[in-house]
Amino acid sequence: MTLTESTIPGLELLHRGKVRETYAIGEDRLLLVATDRLSAFDVVFEQPIPDKGRLLTALSAFWFQQLESLGPTHFLSTDADRLPAGACSPELAGRVTLARRAQRIDAECVVRGYLAGSGWAEYRAGGEVGGHRLPEGLREADRLPEPIFTPSTKAEVGHDENITRERLAEMVGTELARELEVRSLALYRAGARQAAEVGLILADTKFEFGWIDGEVALIDELLTPDSSRFWDAGLHEPGSSPPSFDKQYVRDFVAGSGWNREPPAPRLPDEVIEGTRERYATAYERLTGEQWRPGGESA
């Protein structure tokens, strides 16, 4: 069973995003529903990826619990017995997160530990990534001397824009920009250490934050294949793009198709859809140590 759009009777739908839908519970809590929709290059594809919403919900919950010591978050629970009755239907099972409501900070907090994706393209063009001057002679997929913080704008429509730390400070204030950088780097390092223990490289990832009760809290998803680039450490060879357990598989396919990255997205072959699902499930199993049952919950 796949889900491309949700309806929860009795709850107000606040926002229908690219892949998630947000409902209000009173004044201070939210329900986040992860659908099976897929976006790449900020465009939503018509075809869903089976199991994707459940996998992202379960993996995000795992990381929120693993990294809870690193600061406030919006996460409360994914347990069905804490959800409203309308959110416990079979099609929503395993897709729903109960969270505290936050005032979102309009920036994406990207951390890169390796040279890949748009960071690699930016480096080739000018030797910098997000305003960070990097050593000469680096290759694609090389590990950086230290993880770097490279924020971007948070676009409701169209493409996000990479910005420097100085531009972020102009947008949100110097003190908040510094806190976002420190928090993001700490989360990345903790996630990368844990991924390394199971033979995975966390090449890069993005975080989002918001204000809750006067504190900066981590919100949205956390260290999932939708927001992160995971590589198999055993297959990592600098100089080329390593096989990954995320939606880079889709990006590579559509880039090779000649698509101009504007709507509508091209149709995906069945093997790309299934290959993407397998990569997400593999990331979940490697990171959590639990087996994923196709079409259902973890074992």
Image (cartoon, helix red, strand yellow):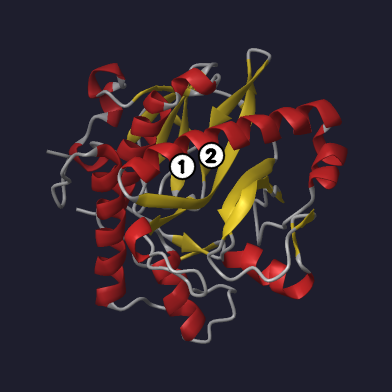
Question: Is 175 left or right of 234, judged from the image as shown?
Answer: right
Q: Which one is in front, 290 or 1?
A: 290
Graded by Cα atoms within 10 Å as few (under 14), some (14 to 19) or many (20 or more), the crowding at tag 2 reads many
Graded by Cα atoms within 10 Å as few (under 14), some (14 to 19) or many (20 or more), the crowding at tag 1 reads many
- Please tell me which residue is depicted at 53% across the width and 87% down the height of the picture: 258
Residue 50 drawn at (x, y percent): 25, 57
Asked if disc 2 and disc 1 are in contact, CB closer than 8 Å, the reply is yes
Query: SS of the residue at dot 2?
Result: helix
Q: Which one is in front, 25 or 50?
A: 50
Residue 133 drawn at (x, y percent): 78, 57
**Looking at the rendering, which quadrant does residue 48 occupy?**
bottom left
For residue 188, the mark is 2
For residue 192, the mark is 1
Residue 190 drawn at (x, y percent): 48, 33
Q: Quadrant of the C terminus?
A: top left
Residue 183 drawn at (x, y percent): 62, 30
Residue 222 seen: no
